[in-house]
Amino acid sequence: MRQTFFRKIIVYYLSVFLIIFFFILFIDYLGFSGGLDTGLYDLFFRLRGQRGTDERIIIVSIDEKTLNKFGRWPLNRKYYALLLKKVYRAKAVGFDIIFAEPAEEDKEFAAIIKKYDKVILPVYLDMHMNLVYPGQIFSPCKTGHIHVEPDIDGVVRKVYHTLYYENVIIPSFSSTMYEVINESSFDRKPLSSMNPNFRSPDKVIQLDRMLINYYGPPATFPFISMCDVLEGRLPADFFLNKIVLVGLTVPGIVDTALVPFSYQRNRMPGIEVHANILNNLIDGSFIKEISNKKRYLFSFLISFLLLFFFLKTNEKMSIFFWFTGLIVISIFTYLCFTHLHCWVRPFIFYCGISLAFLTAYIYRLDEAARRLDLRYSAIISLPGMENQTSVSYIHGRGLIGFLSAAGINARVQKLISVEDEYEEKLQKIIDEKTMRLSEALTMVKSMTNEIIFRLTSAAEFKDEPTGRHISRVGLYAKRLSEALGMPEDFVEQITLASAMHDIGKIGIPDAILTKKGPLTAEEFGIIKRHTYIGERILSGSKHPMIQMAARIALYHHERWNGTGYPEGLRGKDIPIEARIVMLCDIYEALRSPRPYKKQFTHQEAFFIITRGDFKTSPEDFDPEVLQIFIKIHPLFEEIFNEFSDS
C-alpha cells in the first residue's frame, strides 16, 4: 500500500513537471526569454573576439578630413563622379548615401554610373511609408534597401534581404552587391511562402531573414579616407577587383548602430554594418538559427530524461549533475555559435534542466515531510496519547502542509501540547513505568526539537538546504547568552528559538528571495515583511520558547540606534533576545557566501562588526552585547568551522 501511494505521488510530480515545462515553452514562444538569450548571444561574440574579414572589401570613408578638404556635408556630387573614376577597376561599388534630391552635377555622375554598370545605390522607406529611390536621372541603376532591423534593446543583430511593399520587390543593399559581384541572382523566398493572413499590399513584408555574424567591433574593416583616394595617394591598381563601399563616418552626422560588440556603447557606422552583411554572404558565415520546434523537442527529451536520473540519485549527485548540465549546455551553445555559425537559444534548456532538478528535489522534500508525519503518528500512538488526533500517513499533506503558515504553527503547537500532556502523565505514573516513560519523554523532547529544526529548514531550504546556518545561529546565541550571564532556561530557549528567526521568509516570493543581484527598493520592502509574517506564524502560543521565537522573528532586524526595521525600535525597547540574535545573524550573513557577495573571513567579519562598513556600524548593536562578542569572538570562529559544510 505504501509503495502504491508513493507511485501516485511520483505520477503527481511528473504531471506538475509537464505542466510547468509546457508553460515555460509558452513563455519562450511569446518572447519573454529574449533578454537572457540575446545577452548570451552578444556575450558569445565578445568571448569569440575579432575574426578576419575578406581583404577585398574596402570602406571609403567620408570622414572629417574629407569634409575639411572638399566642403561641408552634403558633398558636391562631382566628387563622387571623380571617386568612381579613381575606383573604376573595382569589382563593385556601393554607396550608402541617398541621392534622392536633384543636383547640378547629377548628369556627369549618372553618366559614369551607367558606364561602369557595377554601382549600387540605396533605397529606403521614409516615416510615411514612401519608397525613396535615387533621382530619376540615375534610372535605371542597381539599387538595394539599407534598412537593418534593431531588436527591442536597440542592437542590430539581423537583416531582411527581401522586402515586399505595394507588390514591389526591394532587395537588400548587400544582396544586390552580392549579385553584382557573383554575376548571379540571389536565392530569395517568393511572396507565396508568406502566410496569406499576413500579406497585404500596404504592409511591408520582410523575408530572407539573416542573423549578422559580426567580424569584430567598429573599425574591424579597413577604412580609407575619400580625401586620400581623390588626391591620388593610393597606387593605380589598388582597387583592382576590390569591393568598395562608400559611406559617411563623421560622428554626429552619420546614423550609427549598436552591435553585439558595443559593450562600451561604441557604435558602428551604417556602412560598416553593410560590410559585415556582405562579407557574411560572400563567405557563407552568416548565423543560422535552430527552429523552435527542434529546440523544444530536444529540450523536452533532455529534461525528461534528467528528471528520472535526478529521482534516482542522491541530493549531492543531483546538484553536481544539474550544475554540470548547465555548463555543458553553455559550452555546446558557444561551440555551435563559433564553429558551426549556428545559434541555439539556450534559455529553454536551462529552464528544462533546472525544472527537472527542482521537481526531483521538491519530491524528496515532500517524501521527507510525509515520513515526518509518520514519525508524528508514532509519537501520539504511545501509551496515554490515544485521544490525540493523528496525522495519518495516507491523508497527510506532506510538504504542502509543512510549508503553509498554519501547517507549521499547528504542528509546532501540537507537538508542544503533546510534550506538556505527556510530561504530566509521566509524573502521575512515575513509580510504575519510570524507565519506559523516561525513554518516551526523551524521545518526545528530541522529536520536538528535531521537527522544529526540520520545519524551519524546510522553510529556508532555498537559501540554506543543509541546515548548518540554523545550527550555527543557535550556537552563537547560546554562547553570547551564557557570557551575558542569562538564566539557564533563557539560554536553552534562545538556542532553539533563534532557529526560527527567518521562518517568515516562506511568505516571500521565490523570485525575490532567490534573486541573484541587488534588490530594488520595492523588492527590499517586500523582503522586510518576513518579520511580520514570522511573528504571525509563531504568535498565540502559550509556550515560552515559541513566544520568544515570535519576538525574535519580529525584532531581529531592529538596531540599537533606531535604524532597523520593521518598527524602528531603539535601545532597550528591543527585546534582549532579538538584540542577541541580530548580532549573530549579521555575523553569519557576513561569513556565508551569497550569489550577490563574497564570503568573508572571521577577521573580516569581526572588523566589520566592530569597526563598521557601508552597511554596518558598531552603533547598530547593544553595547553590552557587542563588548561580550569582542571578548568571546574566537568561539564564533570555532562554531563556524565545526559546523561548516566544507
Image: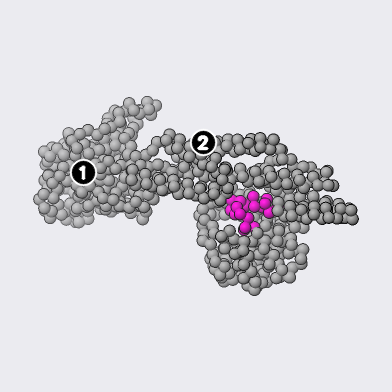
Badge 2 density bin: few <14, some 14–19, many ≥20, Cα 10 Å: some
480 in relation to 259, above or below? below
Which of the two discs, 2 and 1, labels the residue nearer the N terminus? 2
Badge 1 density bin: few <14, some 14–19, many ≥20, Cα 10 Å: many
Residue at point 16%, 48% (across, down): 76
Give the extent of the magenta segment: 452-470
User: Where residue 292 sits in the image (x, y, percent)?
Assistant: 42, 36
Asked which colour scheme the image uses, the reply is: one colour
- Residue marked by disc 1: 95
Q: Quadrant location of the N terminus?
A: top right
Residue 66, disc: none
Frontmost residue, 226 versus 414:
414
Residue at point 31%, 35% (across, down): 208
Does residue 568 appear anywhere in the picture? no
User: Where residue 34 sits in the image (x, y, percent)?
Assistant: 43, 43
Residue at point 56%, 51% (across, down): 316
Instruction: Verify whether residue 464 appears in magenta.
Output: yes
- Of badges 2 and 1, the one in the foreground is 2
Looking at the image, which residue sits at the far left? 236
88 relative to 274 in the view: left or right: left
Looking at the image, which residue sits at the far front? 435
Give SS at disc 1: strand
- Residue marked by disc 2: 22
